[in-house]
Image (tube, grey):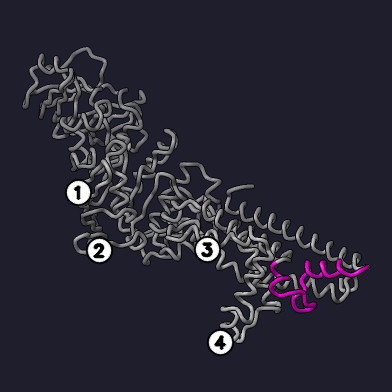
Amino acid sequence: MTDWLSPTEWQAVALSLRVAFWATVISLPLGIWVAWLLARREFPGKQVLNGLVHLPLILPPVVTGYLLLITFGRRGYVGQFLDQWFGIVLAFRWTGAVLAAAVMAFPLMVRAIRLAFEAVDPKLEQAAGTLGASPAWVFLTVTLPLILPGVLAGAVLAFAKAMGEFGATITFVSNIPGETQTLPSAIYAFLQVPGGDAQAFRLVIVSIAVAMGALIASEWIGRRVARRIGGLG
Amino acid sequence: MSLSVELEHAFPGFALDVAFDAPPGVTALFGRSGSGKTTVVNAVAGLLMPDRGRISAGGAVLFDRAGGVALPPHRRRLGYVFQDARLFPHLTVRQNLTYGRWFAPKGGVSLEAVVEMLGIGALLERHPVALSGGEKQRVAIGRALLSNPRLLLMDEPLAALDEARKAEILPWLERLRDGTDIPILYVSHAMAEVARLATTLVVMEAGRIRAAGPVAEVLADPALAPVLGLREAGSILPARVAAQEEDRLTRLETAAGPVWLPRVEAAVGTALRVRIAAQDVIIARARPEGISALNVLPAVVAAVRMGDGPGALVRLSVGGDALLVRITRRSAMALELREGAAVFAIVKSVSVAQADIGVM
């Protein structure tokens, strides 16, 4: 594979995989929690939270990227704080690309998990309670296993979205080869130079392969889980 | 161990106000839909917070409004068997059965004993999706039992099953009643189930308790028959299998003498409870001759209650046991039935169905 892709191209692919992986892993616990809040809880400001979560889905990605830049940039409120107290800098770093990808993929992840929560019969959780399980145990032993297909579907969707994120990423962390040049940014960069089409095309093929692989994997996992639970298939 | 309940709770347009004790054995909460039975069970289980009252089980206070005690459901240690079995679909039958073990104190019945008692040994490695309705309900009962509960709550556990499945499960419930010393609170609106299973009967009507006491006494009370349903009214006669006779009849010994029924598949000596519908009994002043009915029992009138319509309900004492009879007012007057009158109760053998016969 390294022979087939040039070092620059390979770098972009590896970076994208790394960014998408971390964006998915880090946002998953938060995604489950937010999906749970939206599916199961009533609280003031629920609609505001719902709106905030879904905002990146409808805003132009460049707007989301700009908002991230003014919030998490070195001079942004949060960015300044993170830099001074923890020495964490996100802007123009690959970690910033993780944040941008996570924010953009978050609505898709929450949606899938929230649907899974809503499909769990609360009567089963009630039954687990009468058998002596505390609410935390009920969540771990009944709710979580039952929403697992939704969680996996959400994670795969988020991963695929993070792999392909472009607008917010390039706005927030720019397009620095080796640091923030993800797969879409690299394709974009190759298309800007004369004769770069061949390189861009190779990356396009990689993109398609990764996306297809992710979809097939999620299908397969979903089927296996569903068969075990006995709901479908 | 026993359960003591005192509750008041107001819903819009409906008020619940009940107090009763459930001694060991099966206490049936009987009443029409909407009489508040499920509300009582949910309050006992902790799924509903009543406005006022006190609930204790086996010495432990589960709820006491005045004392500020309200244990959450998972701390009450009550096994709840729901109408819809509510098995965990992602776990096998074995894992479902042992689910409560993680949280229960050590002790109680063993998995082997429960599997044996409920006949679910062949199902252990299956998932709930592969079980029939009756099998699911048996597993649900086993799961509740294995959580080592202070008492079992059963909310119409047979209501969702067809007649064949009900008939399949009833014997298991009888075994459960006789094989454990855990009190069972059993909600039902089906008289046949109550007559077979209950040891204590609590009759509810519009959020209140209309009557409570040993099942044979309550069922034989003429004043309650309209509440229980006139067509369903009937009493329970204790009996013992005396002999299996050649012409496919079974001779039972009762306090008032022998009773013949179509073949009852039970060993000689087995104690039975036989439900006899009030409308299937005939009263005669003199011992009838040349009659097809096989069972003629000497009886004494214990109580007569004239209805508002054409009917009358008579409670007879047959050898000390109560027998409820529904006749017309006209007959009651013509026979001059009043307390202390000596009569004969006539019961056709074939009027007693197999489903009306349970073990004691």
The part of the chain drawn in magenta is A168-194
Tell me the amino acid under the disc marked 1: Phe
Mark 4 lies on a secondary structure that is helix
Alpha carbons under labels 2 and 3: distance apart: 33 Å
Alpha carbons under labels 1 and 2: distance apart: 19 Å
Disc 2 + disc 3, Cβ < 8 Å: no
- With B355 as the anchor, is A123 left or right in this view? right
The residue shown at (71%, 70%) is A169
- Closer to viewer: mark 1 or mark 4: 4
The residue shown at (30%, 62%) is B71
Q: According to the image, label 4 marks what residue?
A: A85
Most extreme residue toward the right is: A195
Question: Can residue B301 be seen in the rendering of this structure?
Answer: yes
Labels 1 and 4 positioned on one and the same chain: no
For the N terminus of chain A, give its image quadrant: bottom right
- With B232 as the anchor, is A37 left or right in this view? right
- Closer to viewer: mark 3 or mark 4: 4
Alpha carbons under labels 2 and 4: distance apart: 47 Å
The residue shown at (73%, 71%) is A170
Labels 1 and 2 positioned on one and the same chain: yes
- Closer to viewer: mark 3 or mark 1: 3
Tell me the amino acid under the disc marked 2: Val
Alpha carbons under labels 3 and 1: distance apart: 45 Å
Of the numbered discs 3 and 4, the one sitting upstream in the chain is 3
Disc 1 + disc 4, Cβ < 8 Å: no
User: Crowding at label 4, few (<14), some or many (≥20) Cα neighbours within 10 Å?
Assistant: few
Q: According to the image, label 3 marks what residue?
A: A34
Q: Which mark is residue B20?
A: 1
Chain bearing tag 3 is A
Mark 3 lies on a secondary structure that is helix
Q: Which mark is residue B69?
A: 2
Mark 1 lies on a secondary structure that is strand
